[in-house]
Amino acid sequence: MAAKALSFDVGDYVVYPKHGVGRVIELQKEQIAGMELELYVLRFEKERMTLRVPTNKAEGVGMRKLSSDKTLGEALETLKGKPKVKRTMWSRRAQEYEAKINSGDLVSIAEVTRDLFRADDQPEQSYSERQIFEAASSRLARELAAMEETDEPGALKKILRILNEAAPKYNKERAE
C-alpha cells in the first residue's frame, strides 16, 4: 500500500464532501476479500450515520480536515457579498448549487447560502430553493460549529445574522 498522505486521529473532526462534518470515532483493521484494510470509522451525528472509509482512499474521495481560519474568514466574508442570481433555468441552477454543496468547499457552500438567502421582507422561496438553502446553510453551520466549538443552532444564528445585515444593502439596489 502507498504511504498515507492524509492522516486523521480518533476524535478529529473531518469533512466528507457528500455528507459534511463528521468525527473519526475509530480506526479499524478488517479483512475484506482476503486483503487487510485499514478504515476510518466516521460518525455523522446529524444524519445518525456511520461511514467506513479506507485510509488509502480518504484523499481520493475528498475527505479533509476542518477548514483553516483563513478559509472560514473567506466564507463568512462571502456571505456579506452581493448575491449572484443567474437567469438560467432553475433545474440547471439547482444542479450547480448541489454540486457546490457536495464539493465540500466552504467558500462555495457560503456562495450557495448567500445566493439563496431571503430576508423576511423578500418574496417567498420555492420549496426546492428552500431545501437547497437549508442544506447549504446547515453544512456551513456544522463546520463553523466544529471550528468554533459551539453547536449548530448557534452557528446558524451567526450565519443568518451576517446575511440579514448584508441583505438590506442589496435589496435596496434591486428596488431602484
Image (spheres, rainbow, N blue to C red):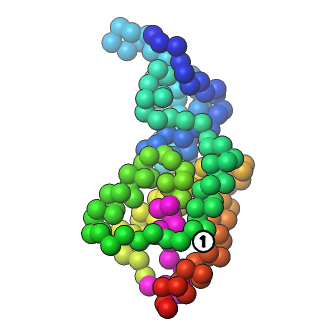
Q: Is residue 55 magenta?
A: no
Q: Quadrant of residue 163?
A: bottom right
Residue 73 point in image, percent of width and height: 67, 54
Left or right: residue 68 compared with residue 35: right
Q: Which residue is found at the position 46% from the left and 65% from the top?
A: 133
Q: Which residue is found at the position 52% from the left and 26% from the top?
A: 40
Tell me: residue 82, above or below residue 2.
below
Q: Nearer the viewer, residue 125 or 25?
A: 125
Q: Is residue 119 magenta?
A: yes
Q: Nearer the viewer, residue 138 or 50?
A: 138
Q: Quadrant of residue 9?
A: top right
Residue 147 point in image, percent of width and height: 68, 47
Left or right: residue 68 compared with residue 28: right
Residue closest to the far bottom: 176
| Extent of the magenta region | 111-123
Q: Which residue is found at the position 59% from the left and 32% from the top?
A: 24
Q: Give the residue at mark 1.
A: 163
Left or right: residue 72 compared with residue 21: right
Total labels: the figure holds: 1
Tell me: residue 164, above or below residue 109.
below
Residue 132 point in image, percent of width and height: 42, 63
Q: Is residue 115 visible?
A: yes
Residue 166 point in image, percent of width and height: 62, 75
Q: Nearer the viewer, residue 58 or 105?
A: 105
Q: Is residue 19 visible?
A: no
Residue closest to the far right: 149
